[in-house]
Amino acid sequence: MLDARIMAPGGGGICKEVIESRVAFADYDMVTLSADLRGSPSRKTVTGLCGNLGSTSANDVHELLECPVCVNLMYPPIYQCPNGHTVCSNCKTRVHNCCPTCRNDLGNIRCLALEKVAESLELPCRYQILGCHDIFPYYSKLKHEKNCRFRPYSCPYAGAECSVTGDIPFLVTHLKNDHKVDMHDGCTFNHRYVKSNPHEVEKATWMLTVFNCFGRQFCLHFESFHIGIAPVYMAFLRFMGDEDEARQFSYSLEVGGSGRKYMWQGVPRSIRDSHRKVRDSQDGLIIQRNMALFFSGGDRQELKLKVAGRIWKEQ
Ligand SMILES: [Zn+2]
Ligand SMILES: [Zn+2]
Ligand SMILES: [Zn+2]
Ligand SMILES: [Zn+2]
């Protein structure tokens, strides 16, 4: 918004200044209006929950708080040039202290009034549309949004960089259609991992299978990597949901051969924890390559692991 008026063509020198100061005056009116509303019983309207005048002015204040350069909401210190154009502290450095609007030297003038107005604002969580109905003081909003339980999940697929985010049903469809991931129904499984050249650990073999049980989805990861210089295989389970729900489940994994057996019992990790993070914390069944080849039988030239597992709900 701010950009649009700044960039408006036809406004040469002085004329432009006049237009801008009139706009600034109008903004000032709206700020006062919403500040008044704050103390009134209709306080909620300021948050933009209702489509009336109150929310309109709140939106305008919201726009005032958008940095004209990066269009992010500005947080203190908010700076302004001698002509009153505002800019966020990050962009102040980026534009080398030159006002992006009027090219004057920015100096070090804080816009305390705008900082104060921001402080008085209460805004809905940005994931309102996804179901979060909480409202936050301006300066706590960002912190909440980083941990909001309605924030979208990242795609749990580990192989390639995938930037897809969304809710669980969306991600399940995405895994199926775009990553061609195997889907299995049921709480027990028997999986075979075969690799013809088990010495190519560097070309990380990672596999993902999704299990549907208890009406929820679990990701079984299997992959090879190095711990220090030791090549290992690792299997672990992640829950497609939040941490507090993940804790309600347990799982076991079992791998063996030639009369020996390794067992792991664990708690699935939430997919909020990145694949990498879970792997590096070694929170899963880890098999040294030598042992894996021993379990594979034969001439140790091929990896053939049978992993059996079970998922259950804790009472
Ligand atoms: Zn900025
Ligand atoms: Zn300026
Ligand atoms: Zn939220
Ligand atoms: Zn993906």
Image: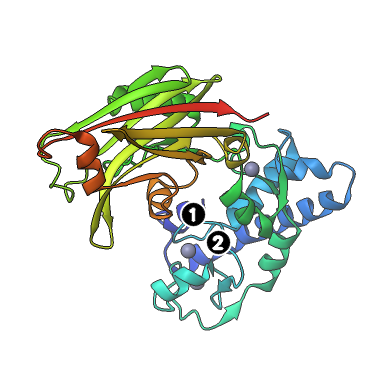
The quarter of the displayed image where residue 249 is located: top right
The residues tagged by marks 2 and 1 sit, at their Cα atoms, a distance apart of: 8 Å
Residue 240 seen in this snapshot:
no
Across and down, in percent, residue 52 comes to 74, 35
Q: In the depicted view, which residue is nearer to us: 211 or 227?
A: 227
Q: The disc labelled 1 sits on which kind of residue?
A: Arg
Residue 175 seen in this snapshot:
yes
Q: The disc labelled 2 sits on which kind of residue?
A: Glu
The quarter of the displayed image where residue 56 is located: top right
Q: In the depicted view, which residue is nearer to us: 94 or 1?
A: 94
Which residue was labeled with disc 2? Answer: 20
**In the image, which disc is placed on residue 42?**
none
Q: Earlier in the sequence, mark 2 or mark 1?
A: 1
Which residue was labeled with disc 1? Answer: 5
Residue at the spot 70% in from the left edge and 40% down from the top edge: 48
Density class for disc 2 (Cα within 10 Å; few <14, some 14-19, many ≥20) is some
Q: Are marks 2 and 1 in contact (CB under 8 Å)?
A: yes
Across and down, in percent, residue 167 comes to 50, 31
The quarter of the displayed image where residue 206 is located: top left
Residue at the spot 47% in from the left edge and 70% down from the top edge: 90
126 shown above or below 211: below
Q: In the depicted view, which residue is nearer to us: 95 or 305?
A: 305
Residue at the spot 75% in from the left edge and 45% down from the top edge: 46
Label 1 sits on a secondary structure element that is helix
